[in-house]
Image (tube, grey):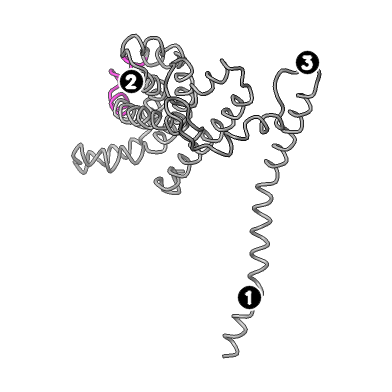
Amino acid sequence: MTIARKRSSATLFDAPWLARLKLKERLSDLLPPIVAIAIFLVLWQLFSWIPGATLPGPIRVVQETWTLILYPFYDRGGTDKGLFWQIFASLQRVALGYTFAAIIGISLGVLVGLNKTLSKALDPIFQLLRTVPPLAWVPIALAALQQNQPAALFVIFITAVWPILINTAVGVRQIPQDYNNVARVLQLSRKKYFFKVLFPAALPYIFTGLRISIGLAWLAIIAAEIVMSGIVGIGFFIWNAYQNSQISEIILALVYIGVVGLLLDKFMAWLQTVILPEEQR
């Protein structure tokens, strides 16, 4: 009984110190970015007060977009919707285009990684197409598909597919020769070789491509929606605000775009830690 009481009292005594230690660690992580953001906002506000400045400061941006901030879920029909629905529509397009890019990119990447002749034949085409900016694909997509929605999905796909494809091919080529030798000795079927050897070994490279591509897909849909008129989406929201000289709304939309892009990247990083073994992260 005495020993039990001593242990329980020691645990209670140590608990506040552990809590304080964790709190200090969190503050040490949070404090630098908070200070940096505060300094940025102050400098931005100071520059906006310079005579002749055309961009509004953060105070004015909040004042002029307060309704949009408070009511992101309103829907008046057509393209007159709150920022939540604008971003949600863009994310839906990104999800579809990105899924197609992941499926095609991983599949082609495996084929190109396994076949050196195919890799030599297709590499010039891949290197040529991957350097084309997303905006340059918009007229081609509209001319070929004739509709905004399929064209937007194609722009997302063609922008996001290359990092996935190239990183997958590199990952397949980087499989240690010992793994392939063991697979031959064990006479593994193609199915078992793919799921037991090739895919696990290439997975870190695949996730690198997926993480890069999610950011490119988000950038691509913004560019596509700015050009494509009459569709619900954050890109069209920005273009419509520009045409109406509502600069504060543009700045607010840019903040939302950055936050969503950051969350997408963090989600992919979290997914990578969940799926990959610790030694492969």
Q: What residue sits right under mark 1 in the picture?
A: 12
Q: Which of 275 and 216 is in front in this view?
A: 216
In the rendered image, which residue does mark 2 sit on?
A: 150
Tell me which numbered mark, 3 or 2, is placed earlier along the sequence. Answer: 3
Q: Do the residues labelled 3 and 2 touch (CB within 8 Å)?
A: no
Q: In which quarter of the image is residue 229?
A: top left
Residue under pointer 3:
52
- Where residue 157 sits: x, y (%)? 37, 23
> Residue at 59% of width from left, 31% of height from top?
255
Instruction: Give, as a single range, the part of the protein colored magenta.
Output: 110-123
Element under label 1? helix
Query: Please, is residue 190 above or below residue 222 in the view?
Result: below
Residue type of the residue flagged with mark 2: Pro
In three-dimensional space, the C-alpha distance between marks 3 and 2, rounded to whole angstroms, equals: 43 Å
Above or below — where is 78 with respect to 38? above
Amino acid type, label 3: Gly
